[in-house]
């Protein structure tokens, strides 16, 4: 199921659940019958389990329903039925409104040892000494403490305010109710958890659920064998990284098409935001993990051999200093499309949203972003454009995507940026000094962080550049490094629509390209 309505359904359903719980706490006149309150509490995991342990009654088997639900659908309890989980979703959304970076989560490795240690410790203490630690960490208990200690007094205060106002008009439908506080020591635990969970959810989404909460950890274990789950379609995924950025559980490793089901709370944000419909919520099957075809294997092996061969031969070329060209190049670079910054998605979307505020230009640490004059046309005057004659786009930098106030440059996690192809390299052999001056060079290959540019045999002992545009991301390292003037022997032509480059064999690059080359 790929429908974007999954997320809307989750929001609507959880909103109803939260409102019902708030009404129960706000019902200081006891207008809601007790049986309806019991219906609401029936599916709360820890209260139901403890009640069943005490009464052995069918009326207290809600925790079994939750277990069955988890085995079928995964951790839907955490997003649909847990009031504390719903409040955390609301808090993280508020955090995203206050500061954009709060909503940029990205994949994080699971704190496996911490999670399961807390679960084992909680179960052990519960068995040996009693349920205090269990109820201390139980999400439903934490929520009701929040409501009792903090929300209910506010509700009573509002009631008394309206009661006073209406009383002046001889309307006494609301009674003044005395607000009684608690011993200050009693507020210590609720305040501690309020600050802990509040701050974590504001900045880190569902970190409490996937790090401390014993219910979340236990249901996460069961969800590993759930029959319905969120999964990737590798053939559709372009590795844009938006799913990972929007995942409040930080459980989507889009580079490896992998979702940590034990941490996924089935919020369906990823399905809603995916522009390629590469994520779905569906039954698992033996064929759910797409297999790499023989053709793709052959291409990968061939590319790897070319890269290894080029790097090996380049090592010899690097022994010689890079020469300064003796004459100017003559073949003009045939640029058809400007290169717009990563995160734009496409030139059309970018130019529509960009207000030419120049924040990204001023923030760019390498000064590769320059105000456009005619590259985007008259409507795009002063909007940022990549100028690889002046500099290059740093491989490990996402500053421009983080500072854009209009979302013209959408946030990209670093792993996604490294696979976003904003342009493709083009080689002009007639400009290359290897051909024109019979001189060894290889500066473009040395600078390329993905090794999309590599050296191949040319004449005698000379090597000449060759390009694998499948792994080229259009960063401009090669163009900036090329020593020939006024026209480069290698240049980047922009992509009208940004694409996904294939992952290089060695994703981690140790190359540290200097701001200025020594030639």
Image: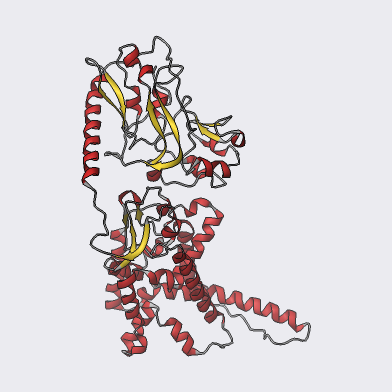
On screen, residue 381 above or below 519:
below
| Quadrant of the image containing the N terminus | bottom left
Whole-percent x, y for residue 98 in the image: 56, 55
| Quadrant of the image containing the C terminus | top left
Please say whether residue 313 is visible from this viewpoint.
yes
Residue 161, by quadrant, is bottom right
Q: How is the image coloured?
A: secondary structure
The mark tally for this picture is: 0
Using the image as rendered, state which of residue 184 and residue 374 is in the foreground. Answer: 374
Q: Identify the residue at image location x=51%, y=40%.
A: 347
Q: Is residue 131 left or right of residue 41?
A: left
Using the image as rendered, state which of residue 181 and residue 511 is in the foreground. Answer: 511
Using the image as rendered, state which of residue 484 and residue 76 is in the foreground. Answer: 484
Question: Among all residues in the image, which is located at the extreme top?
Answer: 326
Whole-percent x, y for residue 354 in the image: 57, 42
Whole-percent x, y for residue 82 in the image: 43, 73
Whole-percent x, y for residue 56 in the image: 31, 89
On screen, residue 180 above or below 450:
below
Q: Identify the residue at image location x=36%, y=55%.
A: 252
Residue 469, by quadrant, is top left
Q: Is residue 201 left or right of residue 294?
A: right
On screen, residue 124 above or below 30:
above
Please say whether residue 211 is visible from this viewpoint.
no
Q: Identify the residue at image location x=39%, y=9%.
A: 326
């Amino acid at each position: 199921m790929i429908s974007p309505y999954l997320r809307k359904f989750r929001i609507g359903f959880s909103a109803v659940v939260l409102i019902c719980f708030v009404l129960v706490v706000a019902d200081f006149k006891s207008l809601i019958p007790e049986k309806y309150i019991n219906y609401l509490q029936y599916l709360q995991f820890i209260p139901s389990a403890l009640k069943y342990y005490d009464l052995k009654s069918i009326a207290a088997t809600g925790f079994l329903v939750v277990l069955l639900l988890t085995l079928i659908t995964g951790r839907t309890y955490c997003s649909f039925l847990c009031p504390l989980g719903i409040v955390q979703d609301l808090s993280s959304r508020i955090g995203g409104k206050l500061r954009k970076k709060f909503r940029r989560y990205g994949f994080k490795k699971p704190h496996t040892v911490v999670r399961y240690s807390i679960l084992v410790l909680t179960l052990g203490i519960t068995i040996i000494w009693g349920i205090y630690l269990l109820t201390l960490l139980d999400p439903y208990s934490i929520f009701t403490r929040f409501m009792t200690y903090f929300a209910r007094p506010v509700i009573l205060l509002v009631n008394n305010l309206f009661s006073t106002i209406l009383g002046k008009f001889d309307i006494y439908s609301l009674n003044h109710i005395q607000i009684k506080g608690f011993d200050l020591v009693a507020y210590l635990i609720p305040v501690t958890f309020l600050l802990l969970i509040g701050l974590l959810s504001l900045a880190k989404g569902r970190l409490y659920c996937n790090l401390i909460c014993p219910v979340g950890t236990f249901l996460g274990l069961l969800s590993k064998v759930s029959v319905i789950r969120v999964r990737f379609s590798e053939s559709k995924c372009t590795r844009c990284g938006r799913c990972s950025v929007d995942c409040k559980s930080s459980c989507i490793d889009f580079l490896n098409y992998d979702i940590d089901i034990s941490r996924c709370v089935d919020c369906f944000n990823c399905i809603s935001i995916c522009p390629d419909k590469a994520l779905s919520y569906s039954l698992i099957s033996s064929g759910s993990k797409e297999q790499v075809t023989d053709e793709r294997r052959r291409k990968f092996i061939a590319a790897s051999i070319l890269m290894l061969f080029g790097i090996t031969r380049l090592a010899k070329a690097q022994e010689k200093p890079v020469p300064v060209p003796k004459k100017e190049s003559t073949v003009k670079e045939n640029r058809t499309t400007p290169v717009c910054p990563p995160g734009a998605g496409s030139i059309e979307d970018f130019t529509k949203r960009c207000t030419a505020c120049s924040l990204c230009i001023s923030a760019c640490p390498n000064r590769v972003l320059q105000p456009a004059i005619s590259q985007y046309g008259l409507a795009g005057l002063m909007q940022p454009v990549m100028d690889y004659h002046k500099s290059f786009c740093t491989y490990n930098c996402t500053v421009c995507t983080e500072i854009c106030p209009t979302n013209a440059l959408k946030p990209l996690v670093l792993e996604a940026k490294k696979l976003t192809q904003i342009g493709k390299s083009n080689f002009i052999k007639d400009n290359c000094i290897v051909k024109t001056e019979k001189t060894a060079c290889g500066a473009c290959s040395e600078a390329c962080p993905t090794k999309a540019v590599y050296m191949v045999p040319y004449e005698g002992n000379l090597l000449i550049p060759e390009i694998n545009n499948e792994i080229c991301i259009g960063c401009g390292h090669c163009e900036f490094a090329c020593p020939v003037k006024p026209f480069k022997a290698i240049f980047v032509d922009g992509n009208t629509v940004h694409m996904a480059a294939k992952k290089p064999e060695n994703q981690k690059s140790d190359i540290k390209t200097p701001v200025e080359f020594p030639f």
